[in-house]
Image: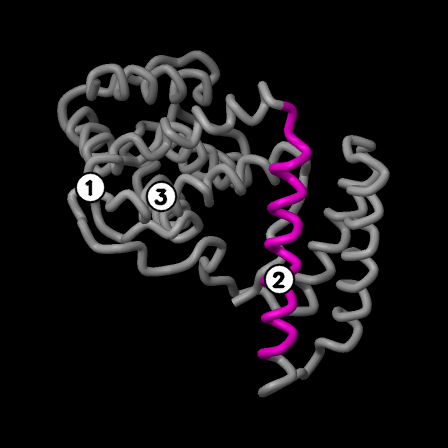
Amino acid sequence: MTADYCREIESYLCKKNDGHLIRVVGPSFELVSRWAADGVPLKIAFEGIDRHFERYYRKGPRRRPVRIDFCEADVLDAFDEWRRAVGLPLGGPDTESEPDEPAHQAKTSASLPAHLERVTLRLTSAIASGRFTAEGGALIDRIAHELDLARESSRGVRGEARRELLGRLASIDAELGELAIASLASAERAAIEREADEELDAFRSRLAPDAYARARGAIVDRLARAAFGLPIVSFS
C-alpha cells in the first residue's frame, strides 16, 4: 500500500513538473511513506503539492523541476487543515483521542465582513449555476440576502451581539450542508461517501465509532458543498 501511495505521489509530481520525472526514492521515499503512515489522504497531499507549485509559479519562469521534499511543509499544512475541518485529532492515525475541534473551525485571519462578502458572492454564483430546485434556490437566495445585511452591520460588532451573529452563521451553515447533501443524485452521493471512506481509511481502526461517523459526515458535507460550489458560512 505504501509503495502504491508513493507511486501516486511520484506520478502527480511528474505531471506538475510538465512530464519531468523526479523519482521518489531514498530519503524522499521515506518522507512520502511517513505521509502514508500518518494517514495523509492522497487528495490532500496533492492539494499541498499544488500550493507549493502555485508559489513557485509566482516567482517567475521555472528553472528546474521540483523535488517532493520541497513540498513537505505545504502538504503537512493542508493535512492539518483537513483534520481540523473534519474534526480529527491533530496527531497521527495512532492517536486515539476524540476529535478536538468541530468541523469547519480551522483558524482564519480574515475579517468577519470580508468573510461574509466572499460567502455572499459564492452563494450568488451557486444560484446562477441552476443546479438547485426552485425551493433550494429560494433558500440560498434568502440566505445570501440575510448575510449581505449581516455584512453591512458586522463591522465593529462586539460581545454578545457578535456571539449571536456567529451562532446564526453556524445555524445557516448547517442549513446549507443539509441542502447540499439533499440535492445530490443517488449515484453522486454514493461516490462522495466512497471518497469519504477512502480519505478516512487510515483512521478507521483508531477512531471510536461515533467519532468516525462524525468525521465521515463532515467529509461528506465538505464534498457535497464543493459539488455545488457552496461555501462554509461558519466563522471563528
Give the label, 3 or 2, closer to the camera: 2
Give the label, 1 or 3, closer to the camera: 1
In the image, residue 32 lies in the stretch drawn in magenta: no
Q: Which residues are magenta?
A: 163-185
In this image, 65 relative to 150: left or right? left
Q: Dividing the picture into quarters, in which one does residue 24 lie?
A: top left
Label 1 secondary element: loop
Tell me the residue that label 3 is attached to.
79
For label 1, the crowd category at 10 Å Cα-Cα, with few meaning under 14, some 14 to 19 and many 20 or more, is some
Tell me the residue that label 1 is attached to.
206
Among the two numbered marks 1 and 3 on one chain, the one whose residue lies closer to the N terminus = 3
Q: Is residue 124 above or below residue 3?
A: below
Q: Dividing the picture into quarters, in which one does residue 227 lie?
A: top right
For label 2, the crowd category at 10 Å Cα-Cα, with few meaning under 14, some 14 to 19 and many 20 or more, is few
Alpha-carbon span between mark 2 and mark 1: 30 Å
Look at the numbered discs 1 and 3 and tell me whether their residues touch, using CB distance below 8 Å: no
Q: Is residue 118 above or below residue 40?
A: below
Q: Which residue is farthest bottom? A: 159
Tell me the residue that label 2 is attached to.
171
Query: Residue sitting at 31 percent across and 28 percent down?
Result: 67
x and y, in percent, of residue 171 in the image: 62, 62
Alpha-carbon span between mark 1 and mark 3: 17 Å
Query: Residue sitting at 39 percent across and 47 percent down?
Result: 214
Q: Nearer the viewer, residue 138 or 228?
A: 138
x and y, in percent, of residue 174 in the image: 60, 54
x and y, in percent, of residue 191 in the image: 51, 22
In this image, 17 relative to 36: left or right? right
Among the two numbered marks 2 and 1 on one chain, the one whose residue lies closer to the N terminus = 2
